[in-house]
Amino acid sequence: MMVIAFVLAACSGSNTSDTGEAVQEGNNPTESANSQPGTENVLRIAMSTEVDNLDPYISAATDTQSMMDNVFDGLLDTDESGKLVPAIAEDYEISEDGLTYTFQLKEGILFHDGSELISEDVVYSYERLSGLNGEEPLSSQFAGIENIEAPSDYEVVITLKENNSAFLAANIRPILPAGYEEQSTSPIGAGPFKFEEYQAGQQLTLVKNEDYYMQDKVPPFDKVQFIVMPDPESAVLAMQAGEIDVIPGVTPQGMMQLGESVNTVSGPQNMVQLMALNNEVEPLDDVNVRKAINLAIDKDMIIETVADGMGTKLGSNFSPAMDFYYEAGLEDYYQPNIEEAKALLADAGYADGFDLELTVPSDYQFHVDTAQVVVEQLSQIGINVEIKLIEFSSWLETVYQDAQYESTIVSFTGKLDPYEVLVRYISDYQSNFVNYNNPEYDALIEQAVASTDENEMADLYKQAQRLLTEDAASVYIMDPDRTYALRSGLEGWKMYPIQKFNLEDIRVTE
């Protein structure tokens, strides 16, 4: 799923794009991606959830951000290998002390309203993100900015309060037009697609930006419709009926139904699916209880039964997709051991077990299926788990923002920098809804992000991962593979180290 600005993916997993009824408008197959000359070339993508907020700085859902990434561009972008590449910025320079970042902007870039994108817009955007506009910072990645200056229309100079090795990767965040205050209802960016319409609970419609500054990447589609289909079975049936062109996160069962009639792209997501435990509520505030829960969970069984074997077992809040920073060996730190788990519960004063509420976003069948297996496994040690299903919009408010929960199943989306992955567990981090609190962990992360030595940085991040495991901060389950199904005649969908629907990549072959 695929929590906001950092980006949470309560939505991810093997079926992380999880019908209402098919939306009528634009669902005529004659208007689809295989349209005949003279008709609109429309790409229709099934999405499991609706948009949470159109403003890219406020949106919390990874799927929303993945859709709206096509409307916005940042100073930098990332290719499929995770390498940072120029976008709005044509070049940049970092001072020797690592505190000053100077970006040179490309000239002639137009926002969707026809105004030119200049340094004033970057200053406005980053002041909003950093809180230098006098309001609360909207992103922890930018809270460390000391000052932003625009010496000319095409140059921006950013000064940090202290060295931050994660800051460069943060510059993929969207640049917005200065002073424009309607982003939540009628967003304007400089990306390859323009916002046209959002029908709540039905679909988001984007149209091609003919004036996109990277002309070699102007999309081959006149229009894209992201159609809300919470039920994965309905999405598969819609694809079979020719009403859908792409399903992100199709289930193994769905793939069996579709067979060889579709093209597929699949791979790891650089993501962490976990059973998050609220470390501040009883009895989960007892480390022995959390360890007992870990010992009762059979991750291999979950991967086989829920993900059809298409997932990588994890032991901490980190995927091996980020190989250089990954602490190997933690995935088997807690091997299933029912007797040891019962003994730990007894030591903690819960020999007879206890009741536990497991809050799960109902929009994501992958997490619902995982929760059902967890119920069975924890019953073996006397923990009576009650699943509470809520819509993802409610989950964001109740769990992610207010931490009013006991446990939950969710996925944390991939990031380009290890700091962004691990910062969520710092004790005073605003989105630390797990309520993990360990001063030693805080110190490790602070040292790592300030370091300029790659090897030292990697060692510190590895130590932090091990602490999360030893403290049983949560139950880290897997990095689930994700499979995208494309109707016959569509090719080019690429996997990125972060969830990204880069529609510039797709091509119609027939």
Image (cartoon, rainbow, N blue to C red):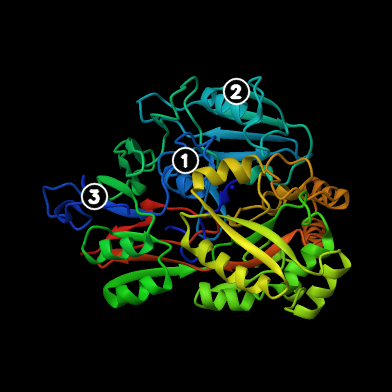
Residue at which label 3 appears: 42
Which amino acid, mark 3? Val
Q: Tell me the residue at 41%/31% (across/down).
A: 187
View extreme (front): residue = 352
Considering depth in this image, is 135 or 351 the residue closer to the camera?
A: 351
Secondary element at image label 2: strand
Give percent across and percent down for residue 429.
73, 41
Q: Tell me the residue at 69%/46% (across/down).
A: 433
**Few, some or many C-alpha atoms within 10 Å of disc 2 (few <14, some 14-19, many ≥20)?**
some
Left or right placement of residue 293 versus residue 484 in this view:
right
- Judge depth for marks 3 and 2 and give the one in front: 3
Give percent across and percent down for residue 18.
42, 58
Give percent across and percent down for residue 28.
16, 52
Which amino acid, mark 1? Asp
State which tag comes first along the sequence, 1 or 2: 1
Can residue 200 be seen in the rendering of this structure? yes
Give percent across and percent down for residue 242.
21, 62
Considering depth in this image, is 130 or 271 the residue closer to the camera?
A: 271
Disc assigned to residue 52: 1
Disc assigned to residue 344: none
Considering depth in this image, is 434 or 293 the residue closer to the camera?
A: 293
Q: Quadrant of residue 314?
A: bottom right
Q: Is residue 485 above or below residue 104?
A: below
Q: Tell me the residue at 56%/72% (across/down).
A: 311
Q: Quadrant of residue 409?
A: bottom right
Disc assigned to residue 150: 2
Left or right placement of residue 349 versus residue 194 in this view:
right
Assign the C terminus to one quadrant of the image: bottom left
State which tag comes first along the sequence, 1 or 3: 3
State which tag comes first along the sequence, 3 or 2: 3
Q: Are marks 3 and 2 in contact (CB under 8 Å)?
A: no
